[in-house]
Amino acid sequence: MARRRWVFAGQLGQQFDDGGPMLIIEAKSVFGRRPIHRAKAHLILSALRHRARELGDRAEFHQVQRYSDVVDGRGDLEVIDPPSWSARRFVQRRDITVLPSRGFVTSEADFERWADSRGARRLLLEDFYRDVRSRTGILMEGQSPSGGNWNFDHDNRRPPPKNAATLGHAPWWPEEDDIDERVRRDLDHWQAEGSVRLVGDDGPRRFAVTDAEARLSLDDFLDYRLSDFGPYEDAMLQGDWTMAHSLLSVPLNLGVLNPREVVDAAEERYRAGHAPLNSVEGFVRQIAGWRDYVWHLYWHLGESYPTDHNHLNATAPLPPAFLTLDPDLITAHCLHETIDGMRRHGWAHHIQRLMVLGNWALQHGYAPAALNDWFVDMFVDGTPWVMPANVIGMSQHADGGIVATKPYAAGGAYISTMSDYCGSCRFNPKVRLGDDACPFTAGYWAFLDRTEGRLAGNARMREPLAALRRLSDREAVVDQERRREEW
């Protein structure tokens, strides 16, 4: 008898379906562990229910309190290795056949072989990315990278066009259906009865949750936004929350899009002369490079990685503005706009995450493990595997340099250059002391003052720390930021 394959919320596409009987479980307890963004809960429930409908008679679909209500005592199940430590532990304790994981350009075995070949050398993204391309042939001309360079970062860091309100073509949006209506009613009921704690807005649904929707979303990006993605991937505009980003992280992380097919489709546009190489390479790097890299680091670094590392001794609790996604508690325009976008959509692009949210949290010493959980819970594409390397490693430098060689801290000048936020802000990015002192600019120096001892041995921080020691108003700036109430 064929085993019935239990698929998790990250395994809902064709790449996880080999044609046999399927099991889908909607476990209510998953949504009650911590406060969660309402749009994220909606997307997961909508994706599960849409997949069950697509599979029809092949699917055994259950809506229960806990996974164990369905799987305990059964001996007919198999799973593709689940996408979290806790889920893998749950499966391993039961009579369930486990198949190798899928859903990435490279396998876990591929990564371990590469990691072992490094010896004592650091597991750098750039080295991993080059290895992936060399082995797969993605954007390669024989043994050489297309265009003669492995990356085109120098072409992909433009500020937004002057006086632009938006970057251009609006994304394709999915249409809600009866499943989405029922999801919304169920979430209202669960919240009213107190079984879930929801944060942020929900509706209309803006991200693909089915194979058909994901392919339409991918084609729309490739046709209309890929060319602008590269040069403006780091830019921010207050009137354009999507910019030229693909919005494919949700269907990718739900498993309804195959990342190799996405990468190949982008490369085909370059080969056909329909998209510039710098944009295609930047997009490929995000998926075949960074996405695979953080997935593999999640397993390689271990389950305790988020809680074992706090190199900068950051212990401050997250503020109410973050926990409730309330932009009215924030004055600084860049942070206000980013939190407001999160409230409305449960999403922000990577520079808003790293150089606004992450930069702010780094400067103010928010506890990294709590921040990691917040990113998992408040972002529609947040998963247990995607955030640790991003938050603990890259954003907060809590691991002391395993993932990134230096903290990603910056003053208001960076945000001013890469956005149109500062022109309408009451704070001045050029000022570090006084009533109009930018919280990011002043906060940068206060951060260096607080972490000087722990960063003294970092060669890449030598010049910033030397500048800190020359700062004539250092004590006044640090005292100002210690007392700051409006930000």
Image (tube, rainbow, N blue to C red):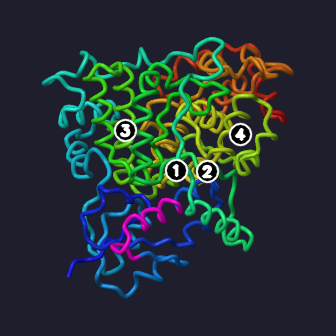
Q: Position of residue 38 (x, y in %)?
A: 64, 56
Q: Residues within 10 Å of mark 1 (few under 14, many from 20)?
A: many
Judge by depth and name the residue closer to the eye, 360 or 275. 275
Amino acid, disc 3? Ile
Q: Report which residue position mark 2 lands on.
A: 378
Q: Is residue 167 above or below residue 396?
A: above
Q: Report which residue position mark 3 lands on.
A: 287
Q: Are marks 2 and 3 in contact (CB under 8 Å)?
A: no
Q: Is residue 321 above or below residue 487?
A: below
Q: Report which residue position mark 1 lands on.
A: 382
Q: Are marks 2 and 1 in contact (CB under 8 Å)?
A: yes
Query: If you read the primary sequence from the N terminus, does the residue marked by circle 2 or circle 4 appear first?
Result: 4
Judge by depth and name the residue closer to the eye, 123 or 207. 207
Amino acid, disc 4? Asp
Task: Give the spatial CA distance, label 2 vs label 1.
Answer: 7 Å
Task: Give the spatial CA distance, label 2 vs label 4.
Answer: 12 Å
Mark identifier at residue 340: 4
* Nearer to us: label 2 or label 4: 4
